[in-house]
Image (cartoon, grey):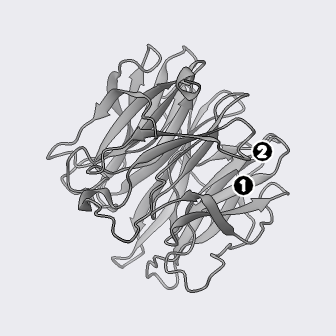
Amino acid sequence: MKKIGREVYMLKTSAENARNGEGAFIRLKNGDIMYAYSRYTTGNSHDHGKAVIAAVFSGDEGETWGGHRDLFLNDDVNNMCVSLLRMDNGDIGIFYGCKYLKESTTVVMMNIYLRRSSDEGKTWSEPIRCINEEGYFVYENDRVRRLESGRILLPLNLHASYENGRIDNKGVFRLYYSDDDGYTWNTTGIGVNHPFEGSAGGLQETGLYQYADGKVWAYSRTWSGNQYSCYSEDEGMTWTTPVVSEFFTSPPAPMNVKRISDKYTVSIFNPTPNYTGREAHPRTWGRTPLACAVSTDDAKTFKKIFAIEDDPENGYCYASVLAGEEYILVAYYHSNGERDPLKCCKITKIDLTEFEN
């Protein structure tokens, strides 16, 4: 694969800030770009380590970044996995996962919240809870999608109910949705399972893409060596049985598909599974290279594929994408020579001309 893009920013770690990433971009009304992400506030980089939602800003189309600040603080909890959405009234909506302890136990639960900002990210409303049930709901960054009808879809993967408490690797795809711009939320009540009962991981870290004809594609990471796909013709109310995505081979790592212009749709993913004889560096978790597949037919086929990162000794994952007029920005975890991929956050700028040359 030909390598494309160039680094414009790296959010490095420190002894007091062990992990940065799982963020999302949004264009502000003054033309600046905000990148919001999970900033871990101790030396603990575990998924359940203490973290807040922070942001950095660019006023020159992503060439330089600064103005770091924490957007809001929550004591003694983990806030992670940001999605940003421009709301109908002009507010910025920020969606994020919040982990907390099940009452009188040490069992971790997770819910998803929405806050709104009417002043372009300077201040935020009190959170609206998006899920009306208790459980460990995994939700990943840059995943919330607004359909052409205005409906907002929130894809989730349930890994534990409040009743049984125990977190299971096996995920079940669940969907919540809002028809009033995020003020109230409902669930379809449907759980979509991996088609093979013996799958240890089930369906994990599901993302969504709406085709021009209205159909919605849900794609999920699995432990089966590929992404798995299912489809909805009724805005998420019902889904087909998931099937293997033969093109999107993948280790247990997420994919992100986004329409970036009238011409292009991109998929950012790790295309190389763990195969027999591969000598994968332990810090990569198999999440290398990081690829950008390009479609010019509304994600029906992806005829071109490029490498954003190709160092076999570093891992990359949890990408988010912003479309500019003549470029895209892609932010993702980068192991940066440390012990695993979930460390630093790198922002890469790719000129759209690179898709043609």
SS at mark 2 in the image:
loop
Mark 2 or mark 1: name the one nearer the start of the chain. Answer: 2
Determine which quarter of the picture holds residue 59. top left
Mark 2 packing: few (<14 Cα in 10 Å), some, or many (20+)? Answer: some
Residue 23 located left or right of residue 282: right
* For residue 195, above or below residue 117: below
SS at mark 1 in the image:
strand
Separation of residues labelled 2 and 1 (CA atoms): 8 Å
Residue that extends furthest to the left in the rendered view of this protein: 15
State which quarter of the image contains the C terminus: top right
* For residue 104, above or below residue 74: below
Q: Residue at x 73, y 71 (%)?
A: 189
The answer to whether residue 163 of the structure is visible from this angle is yes
Which numbered tag is attached to residue 211? 2
Q: Amino acid at mark 2?
A: Tyr
The reply to whether the C-beta atoms of the residues labelled 2 and 1 are less than 8 Å apart is yes
Q: Position of residue 158 (x, y in %)?
A: 56, 71
* For residue 255, above or below residue 70: below
Which numbered tag is attached to residue 301? none
